[in-house]
Amino acid sequence: MSDHALPAGAAAPTFSPKAFARQRRRAAFAEFARAFRRDRLAMLGLVILLAFVLLALAAPLISPRSGLSVVASQDNPRWASPSGDFPLGTDHLRRSGAAQFVWGSRVSIAVGLMATVLTIAIGSLVGIVAGFFGRWTDAVLMRLTDWFLVIPFLPLAIVLAAVLDRSLRNIVLVIAITSWPATARLVRSQVLTVRQRLFVDRSRALGASRAHVIRRHILPNVAPLILANVTLAVPISILTETTLSFLGLGDPNLTSWGKVLEQAQSEGAVLRNAWWYYLPSGIGIVLVVLAFTLVGRAMEEILDPRLRERGR
């Protein structure tokens, strides 16, 4: 009797394809987590991101929203420097600088995330359809993508933001419309590579539909690239929102870091040496953008085998 033979009456183990797939995903995630933890800059970026996300979520607990109201701030001193009562001073309307920084972080990060989700959704859809179907579908979608890439990004965003109503929804829409082409190009190139692999040909030979091939083979293989691109697209969205708000094209009813910088510039905070008015928001933008960039670059290097081999 072989050492590997099953005992009498014992049932042979069964391996479910779904269980095997789940096991592979858990192993891949564990390997990704180990590689990510070894990257000190990525971990630093993650800590910074978590700190700002917690700051945005806890805004009502940290600073009451009434600190943004001009009417509720009439008893505050004007242009007060940082003190115990006002950790980040006050502005020309006597409003709390701390309240503007905390609530501004919520708007800026929310706009960045929402615009990125819409950007990645549009770009991924265009890239997958163009790369998988090819021929005239690819030609039409890529010519449309090229048209958006040829037009300067910032002037197009400024024109769209000026034409549309100044609202948070329209700012998100403007950022998505002007930012998706780069993602579409990137996803398309990956789809062109994946669709030539043997497991895709085998699935087609077995009679799988196009929807099945895209859902079970194409999308899972381009998902890591899309995920890495998400973290790299958020900084662009945040900077675009900041730029539009600084130019006076943001939502006038919401306080964001970009709007704080615009008001500080228009009210002469630099000439007054009121650094507490513009410096916290500027540092917040730099830190969040830098943190997303560090995390995104690390994820891109871990998930892209070519970059991983190049770094060794």
Image: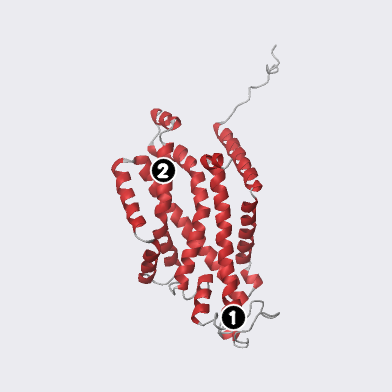
SS state under label 1: loop
Do the residues under discs 2 and 1 have CB atoms within 8 angstroms? no
Q: Check disc 1 and give the amino acid type.
A: Ala
Q: Nearer the viewer, residue 133 or 211?
A: 133
Q: Say which residue appears at 33% left-offset and 44% top-offset.
A: 138
- Whichever of callouts 2 and 1 sits on the residue coming sooner in the sequence is 2
Answer left or right for 4 relative to 17.
right
Q: Position of residue 269 (x, y in %)?
A: 55, 81
Q: The N terminus appears in which quarter of the rendering?
A: top right
Furthest toward the left, the residue is 136
Q: The C terminus appears in which quarter of the rendering?
A: top right
One can see residue 308 in this view: yes
SS state under label 2: helix
Q: Say which residue appears at 55% left-offset and 51% top-offset.
A: 297
Q: How is the image coloured?
A: secondary structure
Labels 2, 1: front one: 1
Q: Nearer the viewer, residue 120 or 264?
A: 264
Of the numbered discs in the image, which one, if any, rests on residue 189?
2
Q: Position of residue 61 (x, y in %)?
A: 65, 70
One can see residue 212 in this view: no
Q: Position of residue 125 (x, y in %)?
A: 40, 49
Q: Check disc 2 and give the amino acid type.
A: Ser
Q: Position of residue 223 (x, y in %)?
A: 49, 44
Of the numbered discs in the image, which one, if any, rests on residue 274?
1
Report how far apart the C-alphas of labels 2 and 1 lie in the structure: 49 Å
Quarter-of-image position of residue 160 = bottom left
Answer left or right for 209 relative to 293.
left
Answer left or right for 246 relative to 3.
left
Q: Say which residue appears at 38% left-offset and 38% top-offset.
A: 210
